[in-house]
Structures are given as C-alpha cells and as structure tokens.
Amino acid sequence: MEAFSHEAVAPLSAETAGTARLHRYSRHVMDIALLLVIPMLVAGTLSATLTLFVDPDIWWHLADARLIATTHHMIWTDPYSFTAVGQHWIDWEWLSEQFYWLSYNVAGLRGIYLLTWLGLCGNIVFVYWRGYRLGRNASAALVAAIVGFVLMTVNSGPRMIAFAYLAMSAEMAILEEAERGKKQLVWLLPPLFCLWINLHGTWLFGIGLLGLYILCGLFPLKVGAFQQTAFTAQERNRMLAVLGLSCVALLANPYGWHLLINPFDMMLHQKLSVATIAEWQPLTFSSFEGKGTIVAIVMMVVANLVAGRKWKVYELAVIFFAWYMAFDHHRFTYLAAVLTTPMLAADLKRAFFNEGELKTIPAMNFAMAGAAVIAMLYFFPSQASLKKMVNMMFPMQSIAKVGPEWRTFNWDYVGGMMAFEHKPSFMDSRFDSFEHIGVMADARSIIDGQRALPLLDKYQVDHALVKDDLPINALLEQASGWRVMTREPAWQGNYVLYERAPGAAAHK
Amino acid sequence: MNLTPAQEPTVTSAAPAQEPAQGLFQRICSRHLMNMALLLALPLLFGASFNKTLSLLSDPDLWWHLADARLLCSTHHFIQTEPYSFTVAGQPWINPEWLSELPYWFGYRALELRGVYVAAWLALFANILFVYWRGYLKARHASAAFWAACLGFVLMAVNAGPRTIIFGYLAMSAQMLILETAERGRKSLLWLLPPLFCVWINLHGTWLIGMALLGMYIVCGLFPVRLNALEQDAMPAADRNRLIAVFVASAAALMANPYGWRLVWNPLDMIFNQTVNIASVSEWQPLKLGSMEGAGVVLGIGLMVVANCIRGRKWKLFELALVFFAWFAAIDHVRFMFLAAVLTVPILAGDFERSFCAESDGKTIPAMNALLAVFALCFAAFWIPKETTLQKTVEAYFPLRTIGAIEPEWRTFNWDYVGGRMVFDGKSPFVDSRIDTFEHHGVFQDYLRAMNMVDPLAVLDRYRLDHVLALDAQPISYLLKRTPGWKEASREKSASGDYVLYARVPESGTKTQ
C-alpha cells in the first residue's frame, strides 16, 4: 500500500509541477512580448512619431565608429572640427558606438532603429526579470517594468548610455543574487566593470554603488523598520577584494587612465555643458517621465504603508540616491528606473498582488504574445520612412553645400551630422573638448548674440549655418558683409546658411 | 484627631505635586521664549534678504506693489485699469494683492526703507513662529518643534523678501491650524474658515490652494481605511455636514472683495492664460536639488522618511496626500518650497519627537533660556540696518539716475526687472514684473522676442520705441550698439552690470557694423 501510494502521488505532482511551469512560462512569454511591443507603440522615438533621429549625438558616434573601424586605430585627437582639430580628445564610448556602426552597416537606418529598440527593451526586460526575482510575482513585475519604461523614455533614442544601464542592471542583479545567497557571483563584477568602462562613463556610478553596498553592510542595525546583520569577515573581505579587482579591471581599456578620469572631467571641468544641456536640467513633473516618477514614488510609498517591510540601509540609500539623481537631472530618470523598479515590483506584490501566478490561461498568454509579435513586425518602419525623418530633422541640403575649405559657424545641433557628412564644423554636441579650450563658451556667446561679430572674426568664420530663431540670426541679418545663401526648413524651424562677402572688413 | 494624620499627608503631598508642575510649566515657557527669540534672530543671520547681503530690496516686484498701495491710499479707489505702462495703459486690470501691499506701504510711509525691511522680517518671522507653534501643538516637544521650524526657515528662504505671498502663507498656516485643532476635537473652530477665506482672497491668490486643501480634507475623511499604517475612521455625518457647510460658506466668502468675481477668477487666469509667464519666470521653474533650498528639501524628505522608518505611525489619508502635495509642489516649482514648509513642518516636528527626541522639555535651565532670549533680542535690535545702507543697496541694484532722467513723453523699452522701479518713480515702462496684463495683450511675448533677438528691431519699430534701457550684457544691447539709428545716451553701473540707455536718432542705414 505504501509503495502504491507513493507511485500514485508522484506522477500527479509531476503533472502539477509541469502545469505550473507552463502557466508561469506562458505568463512570462506574454509579459516579455508586451514589454517588447510597448516601446514601439508609446515611445516617441520608436512609435509612429519616429523622433529617434532628433538626437544629434548619434551622427558623430557613427562617425567615430567609422573612423575606428576604417583606420583600426583609436581616436586620440579631435578629428572633425576646425576649432579643436588636433586637440587631445578620446572616444570615451567607443565600444557602444561599434554596435551602432555595425547595425548601420548591416541594415542602414533600420539597423539603428533595431538596435535602439533592442537596447531599450533589453533594459526593460532586465528590470522585469529582476523585479520578478525579488517579488516572485509576474503581474507585479510587469506593472513595475511598465512604470520603469516610462522613466526610461527620457533616453529612449539611439543612446550609448542604454548599454551602460544594461551593465548597471547586471551589477544590481549580481548584488541581488548575492543577497539571496549566491555570493560567488560577485566575482563577475570585475569583468563587468572591464566591459562597462568601454561602454560609457556611468561605470563611476557602478563603482559608487558597489562601495555603498560594502559600506552599508559593515554594521548591524535593528531600529524600527531598519533591520540588517553585518557582513561576516569572509563576506566583507570578499567584497573588498571584488571592489579592488573591479578598480583594477577599469584600466583594461584602450585609453588607460585617460578613460578613467573622463567622468571626473565631466563633473569638474564641464560645468557649461551641464548647465546648458536640456537633459541635465532638473526634472519637470509635466513631462512624461516626470509623471512616471510621481506614479512610481506614490506607488512605492503607499505600498510600504499598506504592507510595510524591513529595510536594509543599502536599499534605502539606493532609493534616495536614485530619486535624488532623477529630480536633480532629468536624464537620470532612466537610472532611477534601473535601480528602483525591481524594489517597486516587490512592494507591489506585497501590498496589492495577492493572487497566485498560476491563475492564468496559457493559451490566452500565447495568443497575446503572438499578437504582440505581429504588431512588432507591422510597426517596424521602412528604410524610406526613416530616411525621410532624417531629412526632416536636419538641413541636409545646406550641409551638403558646405565646402571642405569653409570655416562654418554652426549650431551645435547640426555639428554631428556635419561630422558624419565629412564637413568641418565649428563645434558639435560632444562639447567636452570644445569646453576645455573655450570654444563652447564662445559658441554660446555667438549664438546669444553677445560679442558675436568679433568672435566670428576671431575664428575667421566665413559661413554660418544657424536656425532662424536664434539671436545670432537677427545680428547676421543686419550685419554688413553677410548675406543669406540658402534657407531650408527642418526640425521645428528654418535653417539659414549665411555667407560672408569676400573681402568684407573685420567687425568693429 | 484621627482626621489630622489622614489630612496632613494629603496637604503635604499636594504641595510638592503643584510645585513641580508649576516649575515644569515655567521651564517649558522659558524654553518657548528662547526658541521664539532665536527664531526671530534666525532670518537676520542667515536670510540673504535680511543679513549683510540685503537682497530684499533687489526684488523687482516690491516697487510696483508700493506704487499700487500708494495709488490706493492716495485716491481711495481700487485700481480697475492698468495705471503705469504706455503699452497696456487703460486696459482692465485688477490689483489682486491689494491688502498684502498695505503693510509694506505703511512700513515705507512710517520708516521708509527700514519700514519695508521690518515689515518683511516680521512677516517672515510670523510664518516661522506659526509653524513652530503648530509643530509644538502636534509634537508637544519644544526641541522637535524648534528644529523643524529651523528647517522650515531654510525652505522659506526662497520667498524671504518683501513678498505679498508671505501673508497668503500666514492665512494657509491659520487654515492648517484650524484643521489640526479640529482633529484634536475642537470642531466648532471650523467656522473660522469662512472669515479666513474672506481675508485671504484679498491677500493673495494662494487662497485657491487653501480651498483645494479644504476640499481634499473633506474628501479624504469621507471613508474609513484600515490598511496597516493607513488608518482612519470616516467622519460622522454631523462632522461631514458641518465641513460641507463651512466649505460652501468659505466659497461664498470669497466674493467679499472689492473686485467681486474677477478676483476669484484671477488665480485661474494665472493657470490657464499665463503660460508664458510661468515658463519664463525663474521661481516657477523646477527646484534644483543642488541649491541651498534644494538641500533643505532633500533634508526634509530624508528626515521624514528615516524618522518614519525608525518609529512608524498611523497615517490618515489627508496627511499623506498633504505631504505628497507639498513636496510635489516644491520640487515642481521652486517658489512652493515655502508652501512645503507651511504644510509639512508641523508633521516633521511630530516625526522628530517620535524618533529622535528622547529628552523631555522639562530638562532645561530657565535662566540660561532667558539669557539667550535677551541676547537674541539685543542682536535683532542691533542688526536692523540704517536707512542709508538700505538706500545704497537700492542704488546698487537699480539704475536710479538713468530712470530719473527718463522723460514723460519717451517710449522706453526696458528690461522687465527695472519696470517696477520705473513705476515707483513715476515713469512709464514698456513692461514690468507684473507680467499678467502684458501677457494677455501680447506685449510680454513681444518683449521676449526682442530680448531673445527674434526680430528685435521690428518689435522696437512696431511699438514706436525711442529709448531702450537694458543691461550691457544683454543681446539687444549688443545689437543696438551696432545698429545705425541708435546711440548710447547714458551708462550706469549696478550690481547686475552696466545699464545702458539707448536713444533712437535719425536713421543713416540699416546694416549692423
């Protein structure tokens, strides 16, 4: 009887386990398919609006990657402008750029679109997976990942930083797994940092977070909702060794210490860039990401009031850091998504999602996933529509007219495209080397119409390509010795190409 | 005989019980006295408006507020049409903050610039004191209330000048106090709200936020909640009906103002019809967390979260909604940090008391408190600046000589910053920092076009302008220097840079040199 019972129960539990697995996986398949299609429908860059090519940076990124791929040498001096040409400059995101260049070579503008989409979706799916691992509830992870997606829309274009956030998510996943007992995984961090530094300067945040993790784990705490035990000596030593190795691994890059100091240079010596670039400004709640931030914070607070939990100091510090950065600099809502979304998933599960995951219909899940895949194929844009968008964004005809010997003052927005089109520019949206040698400050003065004419003389500028709503335009229209060559409609206004009359006297 | 031994202990035990109670009361009072004196001196030491920086007189709005109040007091009529500029003169305009302007005007009449200084200082102090008192009533702990009020002062620094909104915030604190006292059982005090709103609408447009808060209070109290830390009972029918009646009476009381429905509409007009104003005025921009005020907000939120993690409490929906609204408003618009202070400081005092303040208020030395209070008061009396110092500050911020030289028949395009001062000096500006009426008539948009160099000469022509008063560093100044037909008439130094007055001369060409 005993043997019979055992045999009778075993197949039944295997069947149940199989059914449960099917339910769970079908749910994940549907969730992931939905998370893949949502950016195509909602993100301004990837939806029918197709604003991904509004980003001026992608063009000099492609030009960089082209230069490295064709010369087989890393870039050490500024290769594009006539103002900073030959000045020391390193290509600090060279590895991320190679992915875009490869995709562009393979599939043209559709390749850029595809990689942008996959970069964004990679991040969304990663936070979904981390959220699921923390909360063990697919619905909570899905809702949190959707909120995360809203926060990520701030950088949903063809940005190098998307790859860096994948690295950050990987770091957080490793630390989260270590918290669940898989301590050996922390040895993956040094190779991760070795990769990360070649992708983007956000590796500094990664090292900061790792340091914070170690620091917060050094002491025990049992006060109210704070509850944590200190690392054991072995754990502490392992973490310190990992941190040391990660720092060493950062040197494994083609620029050595130059690449290491790059983010510090950004913080200390590029104040003008930070002060003037829109995405470095404080978050506005009226924006899409701003609303997402409010929703995320409210959900997190309410969930913790409805069903509180014990906090580790590190978790609270990460949340403060993430929201602080998002409020202080609009661009870091993406960072906030990477850091907080998985915790939000766990909060939502605790407070609002009490139903088991097995309450789902696999066939319906697969049908939804199939519909999502069909939608992806349907919404994937054609090469012609993408080309049309590029032509709408930039004054392509005016840029084509720029001669190789011209010294053209240009609005920084079109500088990247000029670099891509092999035209010498005054400056582009890289900013760093231009700010170091004062060109950026001069460019701002010229654009704002302050001391503009003598500054144009200083750089021996003979042409200017500017938008007609910039202050400099009013000056050039009035200035003697300057005439309009062409006017071309483009993104949100007209571009005017000015020519200086040959032999015109210097401005007083 | 048997009674005596029984009575004696009663008498002897009552005397020591009363004595410590009285002593405790005195100690707490002395503690309050010291705290209030310190809070009085705090703005003088750390408020940029009141310390050596004396930035209160750099506020461009002060001058047209004074001009408004002067007009009201001299004509005994409320302003109904725009009285100062040559661009929108005679157009319908109401003075939405007429009552708040009067204390500054009376201060100015009595003590000139020192009067404005004292009025602004006392108004700020009253706000700090109000949140301190509300914090104490909430926490019943003077230290917790004091430190919360200090943080409140940091948040209030954003509007710590001679601003009319300060009186609006006093009304908001009064409203919150009434609601807080009602929560403690004195429901009949709610009937003070209608007269409060009647005063408030004449002080400042923030009455709209007050009405919204009252509405939120009613809505949040309509249902019971018991979800872990969220816990509240629904208000009884009698309370609900009383509150609805108070709300309606308050709404009706808003009409008791000299402008009627137009003053009620004013803040809504700001929201719906003054988008350019909100987009371009710096204090409507989002908060920079790296600024001093931003650090105050980070500190406030951080302390609130940590205090609630260390020792949690039960929350009512209204309290939670209030905290969210306050921090949301402060981060979205830097000017609303003051509002965040008014709404959250008392709650923060309660949090401080629960989580950080182990010692009782009784542990204090009255003599030392009195000494510190006297010291703070002496310091305050000593610190108030001289009239000549204040006059010099005004001269440093505004080109008074150039403004003085403007003739009545001139049509002068001016940077909006100096418009208020021109008004105060009896000169007609192109725009001033009221902005509202200028935006309604498209003048402000034209002003921005000219200042941002979008067809600036066409704007100067369209308004038949013959003079321009701008900073030397402004693009329009650079353009006019190089445009035939315009010449520099005068130049005057200021803290913001050189002001240049340009005059139109008969044209000799159109091209910039």
Image (cartoon, helix red, strand yellow):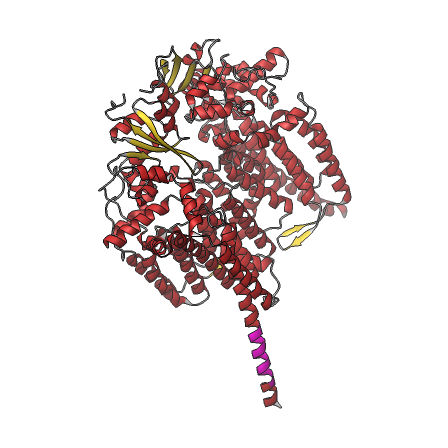
Q: How many marks?
A: 0
Rendered image quadrant of residue A98: bottom left
Return the residue nearer the eye: B440 or B433: B440
- What residue is rendered at 44% in x and 51% in y? A335
Residue A218 can be seen in this image:
no
Residue B69 can be seen in this image:
yes
Position above or below: B446 against B360? above
Magenta stretch: includes residue A9: yes
Q: Residue A322, image x and y in percent?
A: 45, 50
Return the residue nearer the eye: A287 or B255: A287
Position above or below: A28 against B27? below
Rendered image quadrant of residue A237: bottom left
Q: Residue furthest left?
A: A86
Magenta stretch: includes residue A105: no
- What residue is rendered at 31% in x and 44% in y? A421
Return the residue nearer the eye: B289 or B417: B417
Q: Residue B471, image x and y in percent?
A: 39, 21
- Kindly report the secondary structure that dominates the magenta region of the rendered protein: helix
- What residue is rendered at 30% in x and 60% in y? A245
The C terminus of chain B lies in quadrant: top left
Segment tinted magenta in the rendering = A8-19
Q: Residue B364, image x and y in percent?
A: 53, 39
Image side of residue B187 versus residue A432, left or right: right
Q: Residue B374, image x and y in percent?
A: 50, 28
Position above or below: A458 against A42? above
- What residue is rendered at 42% in x and 61% in y? A175
